[in-house]
Amino acid sequence: MTDHRPSAEKIATLQNIGCSLRQLRQEHSLSIEEVAERTRIQPRLLRALEDGQTDILPEPVYIQGMIKKYGESLGVNSLELAKSVPADQMQIVPLKSNRWDGFNRPQIRPVHLYLSYIFMLLAAISALSHSLNNSIQSLEAANKPTDAKLAAVKSTETVAEQPTVAAAVNEPLELEVSAKSASWVKVVVDGQPAFEGRLNPGNAKTWTAKRELILTTGNAGGLVVTKNNTQLPELGAPGEKREVKFQSEKS
């Protein structure tokens, strides 16, 4: 079986790097906790990096990132220092002594993070779609007209289409004619002849029509005409022939 443990030379290289980082930290008078706050790296991993404890550290590719962040937090360009850790050859495997509450520390790889992110994204999209569908169905149910609403609308439309119009009523037309001097008079009521003859001074006659009344006289100035109890002006000059049409008023 092939031994995947790091060689003594590679462990020594990592220990030298850790020792250099420790010296830099001490020169800046910084504690492990202060560096951890700057780099967002757990203090126990920073201590393991300084001590070269390969059984606690993660895979080499992550060690390179830790070294780079550690150096940058101290104001040092540690890119070349990080590259001295061969990520393609140095394979560090966890030992049994590396335990978290009795279990081996799990190795979280980027692919796991991507799969978890995709799963959560799909779950969120599914939940949002379900919520939108429920909202749309609720709105459709609220806006769907019921039989009672349709009946009420139809009833309103029927009333609007058949407005009630009050019938116009014609007031009766009453015409009284009295003679101041002898006058020939002809009267037609609602299209029917009602009187034709001579009125002597002092004579008076009254006619009632539903629609209209036509008065013809040969002495317009010799008559006094009263319509519905209202005396009218003289129809004309004495001896003047006139024909006047009176119509009933609508109420």
Image (cartoon, grey):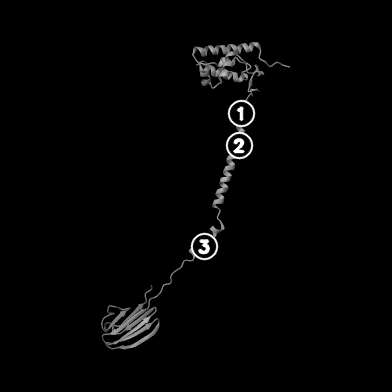
What's the amino acid at mark 2? Answer: Ala
> SS class of the residue under badge 2?
helix
Residue 108 drawn at (x, y percent): 62, 25
Q: Position of residue 226 (x, y in %)?
A: 30, 80
Residue at the image position 60 percent from the left and 12 percent from the top: 15
Tell me which amino acid carries mark 3. Answer: Ser
Q: Is residue 201 above or below residue 233?
A: below
Q: Are marks 1 and 3 in contact (CB under 8 Å)?
A: no
Residue 160's label in the rendered image is: none
Question: The C terminus appears in which quarter of the rendering?
Answer: bottom left
**SS type, badge 1:** helix
Circle on res. 123: 2
User: What distance separates the C-alpha of mark 2 from that of mark 3?
Assistant: 50 Å
Give the mark nearer the N terminus: 1 vs 2: 1
Task: Name the residue: 63% across, 28% down.
Answer: 112
Q: Residues within 10 Å of mark 3 (few under 14, many from 20)?
A: few
In front here: 190 or 83? 83
Residue where numbered disc 3 is placed: 155
Give the distance between the C-alpha atoms of the residues marked 1 and 3, in whole angstroms.
Answer: 65 Å
Q: Is residue 82 visible?
A: no
Classify 10 Å Cα crowding around label 2: few (below 14), some (14-19), many (20 and above).
few
Q: Secondary structure at mark 3?
A: helix
Contact, CB < 8 Å: mark 2 with mark 3? no
| Number of numbered discs overlaid on the protein picture | 3
Residue underneath mark 1: 113
Q: Amino acid at mark 1?
A: Leu
Residue at 36% across, 86% down: 195
Provide residue 52's location: percent of width, then percent of height.
60, 14
Q: Mark 3 or mark 2, which is nearer the start of the sequence?
A: 2
Inter-mark Cα distance, 1 to 2: 15 Å
Q: Quadrant of residue 171?
A: bottom left
**What residue sits 35% from the left and 80% below the top?**
174
